[in-house]
Image: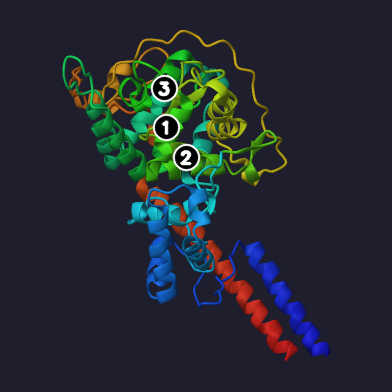
Amino acid sequence: MARAGLLGLLLALGRVFQAWAGLSPPATLDGHGWQSPVDCARANELCAAEPGCSSSFRTLRQCLAGRDHNTLLGNKECRLALEVLQGSALHGCRCRRRMKKELSCLQIYWSLHLGLAGGAEFYEASPYEPISSPLSDAFRLASIVSAGTDSAAASRSNPCLDAAKACNLSNDCKKLRSNYISTCNKEVSATEHCNRRKCRKALRHFFDRVPSAYSYRLLFCPCKNQACAERRRQTIVPDCSYQEREKPNCLTLRSHCRAETFCRSRLADFHTNCQTFLTSCSRDNYQACLDSYTGLIGLDLTPNYVDASFSNPVISPWCSCQGSGNMEEECEKFLKDFTENACLRNAIQAFGNGTDLTFSRKAPPQPLLTLPPAIGRASALPYSVNDSSLVDNTSVSITCTSRQESGAQVNQSKEQSLCSSEKSLTTALMPEQKTLVETKGSGNQLSFTGTVSAVLFLLVKMAM
């Protein structure tokens, strides 16, 4: 009896050690022997192997075609199919961001969840797996940059320019950024100054492929002057990707977004991860909010900074609530999820300060700041891939020592080679450094895990 009690105590102690070490317990099997949760593409394969599940899923898809939710629930066959699928692996499935079959996975997810909820909710649950590691390389890099800059230098510097230089030091970042800038600035005709569809596609390609250590610095660079803030606003080439001649109604824009699988999924993910609890994000997971915000760029609901304010930046999709009629309250609520979102504001502020408050819970969350009247929009900055034409008296000093020592002439054309600042050269996180950081982190965890396992094994042997 005493031995059984001791074994129970050791098992409980093991679970405590697991939680302390940051380990997740092994996935459990449900009644059908399926490991849950699984991604929806895999869940669909498991469902296809079960005749009852497979036929129910086909029935549900037929029920959803051209019918509203109330009609679906009123049909006995549709209702029975829905009940069967609620007990399958499909019910709890999720998708991974940027997975190979992401679109197919998302379509499977919504096939079931639109049947369950009907798509009438103001907020929809995210179809993506939750982000489990809130401290990313982007936050580590921001911490290094923030620690090495005093307040006086920060007011004169242009962190957004430094971010562009850091991007140019990475072949992939430079190539993909050059591609979207040239695509978004390419004039189509005298009446059409750009191809918005191709521009947004190039933007999505950039933010899906480039590590957040680079893309976050471009999107969320902390600005202390208007020149920096205007450059930050220009990051996504808003004249093509963001602005239109007229602002559509926000609810109309949301409706168009929800009619498309990717946009619906990214909007649901944004609402899930950037939802404000009191004055901050859920569990202070700022990484998840910034990742969800970035996922909207290049879609119908592309958000951006509305002006060049550096003290109180306002973010919004390109829409308004004019003409909402009796839906104006709902429209304003939707719009304020962007313009007055304390979670998003604090996430951007935390990144700019180089701090991830998930690991310093004692720090109080920043309150929602009062927004000043919008200032006039500054003229667009000229865009150059190498960004050397944008160096002015507000930017950091440039190091061209090697050129001067070798006697090489500095070419002032648009094709001028990048002359990087010392700060960007020493703080930019290169792929090799990123691999090294990740390898060291995983090695420490494996070492600690092995030690815990050995201690538990010895204790069990002693109890026997």
Among the two numbered marks 1 and 2 on one chain, the one whose residue lies closer to the N terminus: 2
* Amino acid on which the number 3 mark rests in the picture: Pro
Report the Cα–Cα distance between label 3 and label 2: 17 Å
* Residue depicted at 40% across the width and 70% down the height: 54
Instruction: Please say whether residue 140 is visible from this viewpoint.
Output: no
Q: Quadrant of residue 460?
A: bottom right
10 Å crowding of disc 1: few (<14), some (14-19), many (20+) = many
For this rendering, which residue is in front, 108 or 180? 108
Q: Residue furthest top?
A: 376
Report the Cα–Cα distance between label 1 and label 2: 8 Å
Contact (Cβ within 8 Å) of mark 1 with mark 2:
yes
Q: Quadrant of residue 17?
A: bottom right
Q: Residue 430 placed where, x, y %?
A: 37, 44
- Up-down: is 206 above or below 251? below
For this rendering, which residue is in front, 334 or 435? 334
Residue annotated with mark 2 = 267
* Amino acid on which the number 2 mark rests in the picture: Leu
Residue annotated with mark 3 = 248
- Up-down: is 118 above or below 101? above
- Up-down: is 244 above or below 112? above
Image depth: mark 3 or mark 2 in front: 3
For this rendering, which residue is in front, 364 or 444? 364
Q: Which mark is residue 301?
A: 1
10 Å crowding of disc 2: few (<14), some (14-19), many (20+) = many
Per the image, label 1 sits on a secondary structure element best described as loop
Image depth: mark 1 or mark 3 in front: 3
Q: Residue 418 placed where, x, y %?
A: 27, 28
Report the Cα–Cα distance between label 1 and label 3: 11 Å
Instruction: Please say whether residue 241 is visible from this viewpoint.
Output: yes
* Residue depicted at 44% across the width and 71% down the height: 53
Residue 131 relative to residue 418: left or right: right
* Amino acid on which the number 1 mark rests in the picture: Leu
